[in-house]
Amino acid sequence: MDILLKQVRLNDDEALMDVGITDGKITAIEKEINEPATKIIEANGKVLVPGFVESHIHLDKALIASRKPNKSGTLQEAINVTAELKPTFTKEDIYTRAKKALEMIIPRGVTAIRTHA
């Protein structure tokens, strides 16, 4: 077993459970697992939830608000601001901003992303 999560909460009304993970997949859910594991995480009753999904992100346009903010917060102004800024985008600029955006969301539990370019 690669990872053993000890005493996680799966549902409000259920007892705490141990969860075993091997090769990135849940392989055991039991009241108590005493098998060896490469990494043991003591959850102490914390909730175990699936990874978050970012279902709509434009990584090529990420993190441009500091260059020209969308003051009204409307879609129309966002479209206009982006159109104005797009000619200034370079391959390196897009890569750097997209990488930074990913580095912000992945540690916060995002495990799947649907992006547009």
Image: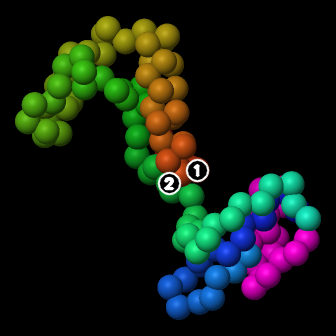
Question: What residue sits 61% from the left and 71% below the top?
Answer: 44
Q: Is residue 114 magenta?
A: no
Which amino acid type is shown beneath numbered disc 2? Val
Q: Is residue 29 magenta?
A: yes
Circle 2 is placed at which residue position? 53
The type of colouring in the image is: rainbow
Q: Nearer the viewer, residue 11 or 61?
A: 11
Task: Report x, y in % for residue 73.
Answer: 13, 39
Q: Quadrant of residue 85?
A: top left
Q: Nearer the viewer, residue 39 or 48?
A: 39
Which amino acid type is shown beneath numbered disc 1? Thr
Question: What residue sits 51% from the left and 34% below the top?
Answer: 102
Q: Is residue 91 left or right of residue 39?
A: left
Q: Which mark is residue 103?
A: none
SS at mark 1 in the image: strand
SS at mark 2 in the image: strand
Question: What residue sits 30% from the left and 23% below the top?
Answer: 64
Q: Nearer the viewer, residue 16 or 109?
A: 16
From which residue to which does the magenta span run?
19-35
Q: Which of the image's four quarters has the C terminus?
A: top left
Asked if 18 appears above or below 103 in the picture, the reply is below
Circle 1 is placed at which residue position? 111
Task: Report x, y in % for residue 35.
Answer: 91, 71
Whether residue 64 is visible to the viewer of this picture, yes or no, is yes
Asked if 8 appears above or below 113 in the picture, the reply is below
N-term-proximal mark, 2 vs 1:
2
